[in-house]
Amino acid sequence: AQSVSQHNHHVILSEAASLELGCNYSYGGTVNLFWYVQYPGQHLQLLLKYFSGDPLVKGIKGFEAEFIKSKFSFNLRKPSVQWSDTAEYFCAVPSGGYNKLIFGAGTRLAVHP
Amino acid sequence: EAGVAQSPRYKIIEKRQSVAFWCNPISGHATLYWYQQILGQGPKLLIQFQNNGVVDDSQLPKDRFSAERLKGVDSTLKIQPAKLEDSAVYLCASSLGPTGFEQFFGPGTRLTVL
């Protein structure tokens, strides 16, 4: 079965620092990939998604992610974080015939002003 | 566009009691999901409905958990009897269809079992 690993459970950064959060999935082949974000007190919401085409995907709020098939990775990046990026970030991959989402354990990001 | 609605937002019960959660998906969304999110973990799918039929309940503890989706719209998730390890946030999500569509999440119900 498909599985997702997020390597960093807690990340602390200062504003303007660069961010990269790791995500690896277990199965190759055709994959769709997602990053969801949960800001404090808010719902889980989609940050960006990859279905096909350009492996560099741009999402909301200046985030981007790169799909590297050979490494089974879909790392999330942002060149300069802001205090408002403080949130928990989840990588997810569909699995099975009805594409249920398999989530990673999440990375809790704290950005200090 | 109204989002996914869930109630209650918080629930505290004692073990062996029963509890029910309600979800109203976004209008027109055929697919509805219930996830369990235990503290420190990512959401885990419990059950997935396509209209009013179950398409995946492989991780639903069927001896104590049940769910239904009335007329392909609202859904309820029930736990009877609850155990301490059921303490978690229960998330409802919906999407236009089962594949290739974004899932929209509700605010969740935080369940504490004492």
Image: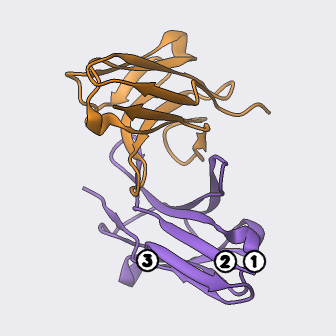
Does any portion of residue B96 appear in the rendered image? Answer: yes
Q: Which element type, helix, strand or loop, lies under badge 3?
A: loop
CA–CA distance in space, label 1 to label 2: 7 Å
Determine if marks 1 and 2 fall on one subunit. yes
Determine contact: label 1, label 2, CB under 8 Å: yes
Q: Nearer the viewer, residue A30 or B60?
A: B60
Asked whether, in this view, residue A83 is left or right of residue A57, the answer is right
Amino acid type assigned to the residue bearing label 1 in the image: Gln
Determine contact: label 3, label 2, CB under 8 Å: no
Query: Residue furthest toward the top?
Result: B71
Q: Toward which corner of the image does residue A52 lie, by quadrant?
A: bottom right
Query: Residue furthest toward the left?
Result: B63
Q: Which residue is mark 3?
A: A8
Amino acid type assigned to the residue bearing label 2 in the image: Val
Q: Residues within 10 Å of mark 3 (few under 14, many from 20)?
A: some
Determine contact: label 3, label 1, CB under 8 Å: no
Amino acid type assigned to the residue bearing label 3 in the image: Asn
Q: Dot 3 falls on which chain?
A: A
Asked whether, in this view, residue A72 is left or right of residue A108, the answer is left
Q: Which residue is mark 1?
A: A82
Image spot of residue A22 (x, y percent): 46, 78
Q: How many marks?
A: 3
Q: Which residue is mark 2?
A: A111
Quick one: quadrant of the N terminus of chain A? bottom left
**Chain B colour in the picture:** orange
Q: Which chain is purple?
A: A
